[in-house]
């Protein structure tokens, strides 16, 4: 007797840290042209298929996202759609038709307030950790300007926000139990604390032909 299909695991209460990595040989995602296309794709795909992209931070060959999703299916559908949107935008700009992403996305479920805070510091301050941004100004290749948890800065105006709004307790209130974030705070390293779950990322992206 065939067993019933497994229901998608609920994720609604827990934010996610998601990473997408480019194939080798592409220009930096922090270049003016590529970052403009990346930002436009994130703006258009920030809230689709049950996935909400709340924050992002771009380095040369990868982008970190802080997301929320109802369940594993919503995460997989939303990330596939977002990856295709980004790939098409970059391929049009670069006049190419090959694959853009090196592999499947990697997603980690965040279950504890401190873990969420660590990931926010990591995603919004990763460029400073790598010496790319050395001043105490906010990283322009991230959503740092939309973050409402800086110690030194007033919250951004609501109309200035263009990514999805957080809805989970952990991402709106819970992480603040461990203190607001200073614009001078450096990430301590890649978040590896085992408070969350490694999620199945789905099939690799097929080459996108723009």
Image (cartoon, rainbow, N blue to C red):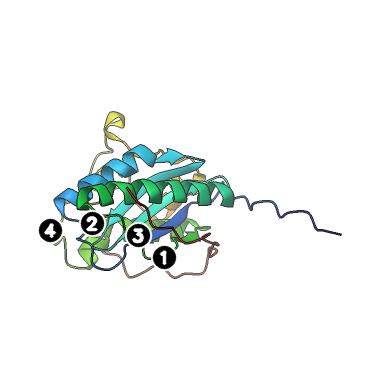
Q: CA distance from mark 4 to mark 1?
A: 33 Å
Q: Residue 167, labelled with which disc?
A: none
Label annotation for residue 135 = 4
Extreme residue toward the right, this view? 1
Q: CA distance from mark 2 to mark 1?
A: 17 Å
Residue at mark 4 to residue at mark 3: CA–CA distance: 35 Å
- In the picture, the disc for residue 99 is 3
Q: Which mark is residue 29?
A: 2
Q: Is residue 7 left or right of residue 51?
A: right
Helix, strand, or loop for circle 2?
loop
Give the secondary structure at mark 4: loop
Toward the viewer: 27 or 55? 27
**Residue 166 appears in the figure:** yes
Q: Secondary structure at mark 3?
A: loop
Mark 3 neighbour class, 10 Å CA radius: few under 14, some 14 to 19, many 20 or more:
some
Which quadrant holds the N terminus? bottom right
Number of the front mark, 3 or 2: 3
Judging depth in this view, the residue of 46 and 126 nearest the camera is 46
First along the sequence among labels 3 and 2: 2
Pick whichever of labels 2 and 1 is earlier in the sequence.
2
Kindly identify which residue carries mark 1: 103
Left or right placement of residue 116 versus residue 137 in this view = right
């Amino acid at each position: 007797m065939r067993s019933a299909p497994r229901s998608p695991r609920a994720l609604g209460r827990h934010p996610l840290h998601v990473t997408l990595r480019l194939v080798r040989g592409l220009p930096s995602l922090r270049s003016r042209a590529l970052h403009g296309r990346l930002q436009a794709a994130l703006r258009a795909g920030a809230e689709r298929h049950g996935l909400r992209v709340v924050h992002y931070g771009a380095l040369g060959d990868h982008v970190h996202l802080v997301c929320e999703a109802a369940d594993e299916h919503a995460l997989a559908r939303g990330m596939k759609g977002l990856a295709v949107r980004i790939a098409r935008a970059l391929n049009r700009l670069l006049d190419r038709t090959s694959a853009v992403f090196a592999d499947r996305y990697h997603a980690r479920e965040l279950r504890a307030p401190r873990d969420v805070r660590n990931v926010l510091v990591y995603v919004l301050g990763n460029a400073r950790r790598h010496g790319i941004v050395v001043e105490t100004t906010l990283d322009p290749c991230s959503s740092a300007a939309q973050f409402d948890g800086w110690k030194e800065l007033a919250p951004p105006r609501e109309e200035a926000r263009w990514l999805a709004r957080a809805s989970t307790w952990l991402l709106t209130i819970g992480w603040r139990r461990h203190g607001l974030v200073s614009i001078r705070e450096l990430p301590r390293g890649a978040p590896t604390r085992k408070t969350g779950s490694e999620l199945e990322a789905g099939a690799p992206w097929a080459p996108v032909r723009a």
